[in-house]
Image (cartoon, rainbow, N blue to C red):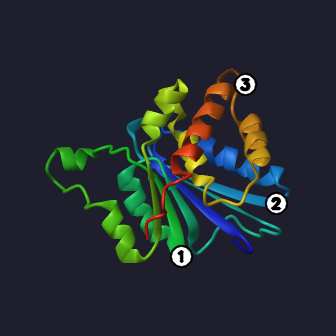
Amino acid sequence: MNGTTTVSLVGVGGQGILLAAAVLAETAMADGLDVKASEVKGMAQRGGSVLSTVRFGQHVFSPVASHADVVYATELLEAQRGLGLLGPRGTVVSATTRIIPGSVLRGEEAYPGELEGAARERGVKLLLVDAEALALEAGNARAVNVALLGAAAAVLPFSPEAWDRGLEAAVPPKILDVNRRAFALGRAAVATQEVTR
């Protein structure tokens, strides 16, 4: 990726979007890049949408961008919503987690169609990861966000050393080891996966 890269991190409250954004920002800084970040928190305690944007490059003048190069989504519906944030040749890295909104449970709306078809229609790349299973394998169900970051490492230009420094800077020491395991499992999960386009 040349110039400035924009990553939009989307999910629902309680899924660790802000921690994932902090790890990403710290990782970019560890690789010597300029970083700007912004966040829009929804109703986090009620499972509302959360969006955080991290932009990095040699010189980044604003945290605001017209489109994202990568959408990182901890939930399928948020990934579908995130498709609208992507520019041409963008990539969605999404967990397979499905959180059904109240409006769907009440029968007021239908859950959107399959993400694969929507991504194909938009002409963007897609990586799907069972981040919940990877987090459990790592030893903590709450490490979904970091397992997904490991998968996102496949499309982001950082060295393994920078990722480790980013984790160390943003993750509390008492949960650092489990998050390192989750990251490694996420990275391994997509090592042989073809990016769907």
**Residue drawn at (38%, 61%) of the image:** 80
Residue with the mark numbered 1:
89
Q: How far separated are the C-alphas under marks 2 and 1?
A: 22 Å
Q: Residue placed farthest to the left in the image?
A: 107
Q: Residue lying farthest front?
A: 192
Q: Residues within 10 Å of mark 1 (few under 14, many from 20)?
A: few
- Specify whether residue 17 is in view: no
Mark 1 / mark 3, whichever is N-terminal: 1
Q: Which residue is mark 3?
A: 173
Asked if the residue at tag 3 contacts the one at tag 1, i.e. Cβ–Cβ closer than 8 Å, the answer is no
> Picture coordinates of residue 128 (x, y %)?
43, 53
Nearest the viewer among 136 and 85 is 136
Residue 8 is left or right of residue 158, and the answer is left
Question: Closer to the observer: label 1 or label 3?
Answer: 1
What residue would you read off at disc 2? 33
Tell me the kind of residue under disc 2: Leu
**Which of the 4 quarters of the picture holds residue 184?**
top right
Upstream in sequence: badge 2 or badge 3: 2
Above or below, 128 relative to 141: below
Q: Secondary structure at mark 1?
A: strand
Marks 2/3: CA–CA distance? 24 Å
Q: Which residue is located at x 71 percent, y 38 percent?
A: 167
- Residue type of the residue flagged with mark 3: Pro
- Residue 49 in percent (x, y) is at 43, 50
Q: Quadrant of residue 61?
A: bottom right
Tag in front: 2 or 1 = 1
Residue 6 on image: x %, y %: 64, 65
- Residue at the image point whose x is 52% and y is 54% from the top: 192
Quadrant for the C terminus in the image: bottom left
Q: Is residue 187 left or right of residue 5?
A: left
